[in-house]
Amino acid sequence: MGWSVLLQLALGVPIAWALARCAFRGKALLDALVTLPLVFPPIVIGYALLLLLGREGWLLAWLPLEWRPHWVFRETGLVIAAVAAGLPLMVKPSQAAFAEIDESLREVAATLGARPWQVFMKIELPQARLGILAGLVLAAGRAMGEVGISLMLGGNISGRTETLSLAVYNHVLGSETDCANALSLVLAGVAALAFFLLRKFEKPVAKKT
C-alpha cells in the first residue's frame, strides 16, 4: 500500500496539474486514459495489463528472456494494480482543485519574479492541497478494495500476493465465514474512516464557497 500511495502521488499530481493548466497535443487522449478505468470492468483492465506487462507481453517481448523483469504474479503486480485502480480517483479531484485556483494569484507571483516551479510549490500546491488529499484518500480506498486487477496481476497467491479483499473472497470460497466476517469488518472500518476524512476535507472548501 505504501509504494502504491507514493506512486499515485508522484504520477497523479503532475498529471492533474497538466490536465488542468496546460494545452498540449494528446491532452484529450491522456484524459481519456486516466478516466477509462472508472468505467471499464476491473478484470478487463487487469487482463490488458497482463498482456502488456507479462514476461511474454507486448511491452517486454522484444527483450531477451533473461533481461525481462518479473512484474506480474508478485508484489510488484499488486502495486501496479493498486496504482491502475486508484490513479483516476487521485487525478480527478486534484485536477479540479488546480483548475479552481485564481489565475490572478499566478500572475502576481510571476510579475514579482517567481519562477514557474516556485509558483507551483508556493501557490498552486498549497491552494490545491485539499483536492489532492481527497484524491489520495479515494485512491487509497479504491486500491484497498480492488479485486479484479489484483487477481490478474498478482495471481492471488496465498501468503504472497493475497490482498485483504482477495482474502475475504478466498475465505468465502472455503466456507470460512468467521474469517471473512472479520476481514470484511476491517475493510468496512477503513472505508468509514476514508468517508469521514473526505467529509472533513469538504468542510473547508464549503466555507470558502
Image (cartoon, helix red, strand yellow):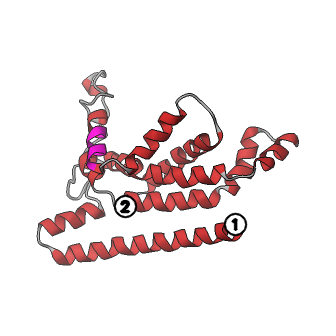
Question: Disc 1 on helix, strand or loop?
Answer: loop
Q: Using the image, determine if residue 16 lies above or below residue 140.
A: above
- The residue where tag 1 is placed is 209
| First reached walking from the N terminus: tag 1 or tag 2 | 2
Highlighted range, magenta: 43-49
Q: Can residue 47 be found in the magenta stretch?
A: yes
Residue contact between numbered discs 1 and 2, judged by CB atoms under 8 Å = no
Q: Position of residue 51 (x, y in %)?
A: 26, 35
In this picture, residue 75 sits left or right of residue 170: right
- Labelled disc at residue 144: 2
Residue in the image at 41% along x and 70% along y: 191
Q: Residue furthest left?
A: 174
Q: Position of residue 117 (x, y in %)?
A: 72, 41
Q: Amino acid at mark 2?
A: Met
Question: Disc 2 on helix, strand or loop?
Answer: helix
Is residue 113 at least partly visible in the picture?
A: no
Q: Using the image, determine if residue 84 lies above or below residue 207.
A: above
In this picture, residue 23 sits left or right of residue 34: right
Q: Can residue 77 be found in the magenta stretch?
A: no
Which of the two marks, 1 or 2, is nearer to us in this view?
1
Q: Residues within 10 Å of mark 2 (few under 14, many from 20)?
A: many
In this picture, residue 74 sits left or right of residue 137: left
Q: Amino acid at mark 1?
A: Thr
